[in-house]
Amino acid sequence: MNRANFEWIMEKVDYKKQLKHLYLPSKKQVTTVDVPSMYYLMVDGKGEPGSEQYQQAIEALYSVAYTIKFMIKKGATAIDYGVLPLEGLWWADDMDDFINDNKHNWQWTMMSMQPELVDKKLVIEAISQVKQKKSLAAIDLVRYESFSEGQCAQILHLGPFSEEGPTVAKVHDYIESAGFTLSGKHHEIYLSDIRRAAPENWKTVIRQPYQTVG
């Protein structure tokens, strides 16, 4: 079988489109969504975004995520899919550290959602392959586990991260005006490649879990 024929029979899947309600929300109004339990590659860390630790975490996540993608593409299922966007959970022991912009106290979990084609065995093999090819500072911090958020409010923020404040406030106000209370961690999904797109065009999903008061 030549390469052309192989590519012709290969199934291509766009999970962002399949999960449009999770990854492509409205930028005009806050909407609610029930986020199911899904599996992610994760790396935990502390400090401001852009720090060395943060960059090392992202490099390790992407290295494993792309290795998994190509293992599946070349495997028996012959499915080609786009690696899902980078996501981040953000919090602090003292939430005033967010208000006061004390970024060195920020805590985070950077994540990459993995489709149902992926299992723990595949992740372990992918991490092993990455270790054989590269020496990555954060590779041993990569873990694979399920994460469930349940009921969330979300909206698409357009623009630089430094201007997210009003968008975040809009989501919080929506939750509180509906009679609910915030729960869980502030969640961001980074849809743009900030190395190539202008800051005013950066697209970020702002998501916040909520629960019934009392």
Image (spheres, helix red, strand yellow):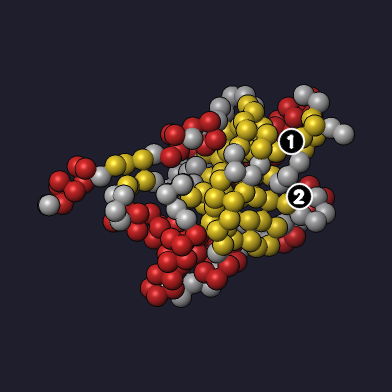
Residue found at x 43% / y 34%? 17
Q: Position of residue 52 (x, y in %)?
A: 58, 67
Q: Element at badge 1?
A: strand
Q: Position of residue 97 (x, y in %)?
A: 79, 53
Q: Position of residue 117 (x, y in %)?
A: 42, 49
Residue found at x 35% / y 58%? 71
Residue found at x 19% / y 42%? 8
Foreground residue, 159 or 38? 38
**In this rendering, would 193 be left or right of 145?**
left
- Residue ID for mark 1: 210
Q: Position of residue 177 (x, y in %)?
A: 79, 24
Residue type (three-letter) at the residue carrying disc 1: Tyr
Q: Residues within 10 Å of mark 2 (few under 14, many from 20)?
A: some
Q: Which mark is residue 98?
A: 2
Mark 2 and 1 residues: CB-CB less than 8 Å, in contact?
A: no
CA distance for labels 2 and 1: 19 Å
Q: Element at badge 2?
A: helix
